[in-house]
Image: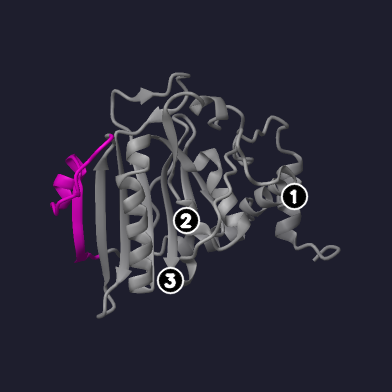
Amino acid sequence: MLAGISLSTAVALLFLALSPSWAEVCKGSKVPKDDLPQYDAQAVLSATDQEIALKAHLPYGQPSCPKLLPQQEYVLCYDPVNRVALWAAYKLTTDDVMTAQRLDAFRTDPRLSDDENAHCDDYAGTGYARGHAVPRDDMNRSPAAQANTFFLSNMSPQVNAFNGGIWSRLERLVRDYAKRYDTVYVITGSVLQEPIQRLPAGRVAIPSRFYKVMVRTAVNGTPDVLAIVLPHIPFTPGPEARTATQAQQGGGCVTWRHTRLA
C-alpha cells in the first residue's frame, strides 16, 4: 500500500493520467463528468486482477479474441477493426439482479486508442441504437459497474425495434434465469457476416446476428447450456427450438441440455 492506495489502484490512475486527452463523453450523459475518471480507473486491471476476472467469468474456457478487455464484473472481447463488441462473458447471480435508476454515460474506452475506439459521432443521427453486450440492468450492483457498461467498446449498432423489442426481452430472460437458478454464466455476442454493412461514417460494423449463451449447473452437478441466436431484423418471432447447427446457420434456440464443456 502507498499512502492508503493499493498498487492496482495506483497503476490504474497512472494509466489514466497517461491516456490521450481526446477521450470523449457523448451528449446526454446523466453521470457527473467529475465522477467518470474514478469509474474509468476501476476498468483498468493489473495483470493479476485480469487473470482473476478471466477465471471468475469464463470457468469453461476462453473463446478466441482479437483484443481482450477484462473488468472485475465481466470480460469483454472487442474488435478494434470493426469497432464493436464481439462477445462479453460474465457470471450473474440472484444477488446481482437488482433495480437502479438508469444513468447514461456513453463514452470512449480509456483502454483503447483513438483509432480503435468507436466515437459518439459514429452513432449520432444514424437511426441505430447503441446496443449493449453487457446490459446495464445486469450491472446495477454499483454506480461504477453500471456506468462502465456505457463504454462504446461494449456497444454494437442495433436496429431500434430490435434493441427495444426481442433483444430487451432476451436480456430480461437472462435475469429471470439468474433468479431461478441462483447462478448463470452468460456469453453475449455479435456475428459479422460478409459483405459487412457499416454505419454511415464507415468505421463501425453492423452485425447480422446476435446471440446469448447461458450455462447453469444442473441438479446432478453437470453444466447445462441454453443458446439463442437471433437475426438482426426489426421484428423477429419467438425463437423456436433448433439444433445447434441450425442455430448457427440462422436464428433459433438450443434448449437447456447437458453439454460436456471440459
The image quarter containing residue 158 is top left
Q: Nearer the viewer, residue 32 or 23?
A: 32
Q: Nearer the viewer, residue 160 or 75?
A: 160
Whole-angstrom CA distance, mark 1 to mark 3, is 32 Å
Closer to us: mark 1 or mark 2? 2
Queried whether the magenta region covers residue 259, the answer comes back as yes
Q: Are marks 1 and 2 in contact (CB under 8 Å)?
A: no
Dot placed on the residue nearer the N-terminal end, 1 or 2 = 1
Disc 1 residue type (three-letter)? Leu
Quarter of the image where the C terminus is located? bottom left
Where does residue 235 sit, x and y in percent of width and height?
25, 38
Queried whether the magenta region covers residue 2, the answer comes back as no
Horizontal arrangement in the rendering, residue 140 relative to residue 246 (left or right): right
Indicate the secondary structure of the residue bearing disc 1.
helix
Q: Nearer the viewer, residue 95 or 108?
A: 95
For disc 2, the marked residue is 137
For disc 3, the marked residue is 94
Indicate the secondary structure of the residue bearing disc 3.
helix
Horizontal arrangement in the rendering, residue 119 relative to residue 234 (left or right): right
Q: Residues within 10 Å of mark 3 (few under 14, many from 20)?
A: some
Horizontal arrangement in the rendering, residue 258 relative to residue 12 (left or right): left
- Which residue corresponds to the image point at 42% horizontal and 23% vertical from the top-left? 199
Disc 3 residue type (three-letter)? Thr
- Which residue corresponds to the image point at 66% horizontal and 48% vertical from the top-left? 40
For disc 1, the marked residue is 13
Farthest-out residue, front: 101
Quarter of the image where the N terminus is located? bottom right
Chain part drawn in magenta:
234-260
Disc 2 residue type (three-letter)? Asp
Dot placed on the residue nearer the N-terminal end, 1 or 3 = 1
